[in-house]
Structure formats: structure tokens, C-alpha cells
Image (cartoon, grey):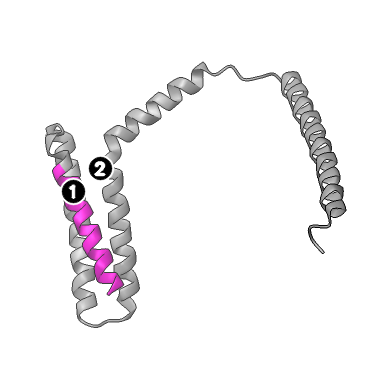
Amino acid sequence: MICLAALGVGAAALAYSYFRHLHADLRHRKVLCSITAILGLVLLAFGLRVFKGDSSLHVYGFWGGCAALGAAAVFAVLPELRAFLGGVIGEMRKVVWPTKEETQSFTLVVLVAVAFVAVYVGILDFFFTKLVAGLKIYQ
């Protein structure tokens, strides 16, 4: 049953990807349609083999549906993903990375601050523990 659900989800995702890219230019549309058709046929083949009762193919049907779902997800977000990654690369080129000396000094500042806060919280914990013990709330 799980394998049939995976096949159905994979086929639905492929159909969504196909319709999403109908407004792409002709060259990209042909490539996307070809890939979608091939993956759809693979899913259909897995589904037919599963219906014959070949239990070893249930696993293959499940993973085939998952692979189709993943491929459809990539196809569906490909233009947005490409634009996002291009923006990330552009922003990473603008980053001013610290030097080795700056990194070492910043690390030292963080370690000292953490040690100070740990001692401060430890002292507060000690005093509150003594206060609660002196009030004899918990016996």
C-alpha cells in the first residue's frame, strides 16, 4: 500500500512539474516534457510490476516513487533555485572575511565572556541553593 501511495505522489508531482513549466521557452519545455515522460513511464512500469504481486518490487516501487517525487521537486523549483543560488554566490563575493589574527582575538573574547557568564550563573546558583535549603521548603 505504501508503494502505491509513493507511486501516486510521484506521478502527481511529475504532473505538477509538467504543467508548471508549460510557460517555459520551447527548448526547455521539450527537455522537461521528455524527462517527465521518461520518469512517468518508469513509474508506470514499477506500478504494473507491483500489481502482479512481485513482492521484491514493492521496495523498488516505493523508491521509484520517491525518486520521481524528488525529481519533480527539482524540476518545479529549478528556475527559482538557479536564481537563488546565483544570488547566494553574488552575496558571498561581497563578504569581507576576517583575518587569522581577528578570528583568534574574537574567539578569545567569546571564550572569556562564556567563562565569565558561567562563573556568574554558578555563584547565583550556589546562593539560591543555600537560600532554598535555609528556608527548608524541600525536605
Q: Quadrant of residue 104?
A: top right
The reply to whether the C-beta atoms of the residues labelled 2 and 1 are less than 8 Å apart is yes
Q: CA distance from mark 2 to mark 1?
A: 8 Å
Does the magenta portion include 7? yes
The kind of residue on which mark 2 rests is Ala
Q: Nearer the viewer, residue 77 or 44?
A: 77
- The residue sitting at 34% across, 79% down in the picture is 56
The dominant secondary structure in magenta is: helix
- The residue sitting at 32% across, 52% down in the picture is 70
Query: In what quadrant of the picture does the C terminus appear?
Result: bottom right
Q: Dot 1: few (<14), some (14–19), or many (≥20) neighbours within 10 Å?
A: some
The mark nearer the N terminus, 2 or 1, is 1
Q: Which mark is residue 38?
A: none
* Residue 102 place in picture, x, y as percent: 73, 19
Q: Nearer the viewer, residue 76 or 124?
A: 124
Give the vertical position of 19 relative to 80 (above or below): below
Q: Secondary structure at mark 2?
A: helix
* Residue 124 place in picture, x, y as percent: 81, 40
Does the magenta portion include 29? no
* Residue 105 place in picture, x, y as percent: 77, 22
Residue at the spot of label 1: 16
**Which portion, as a residue range, is magenta?**
1-19
Q: Is residue 11 left or right of residue 93?
A: left
Residue at the spot of label 2: 76
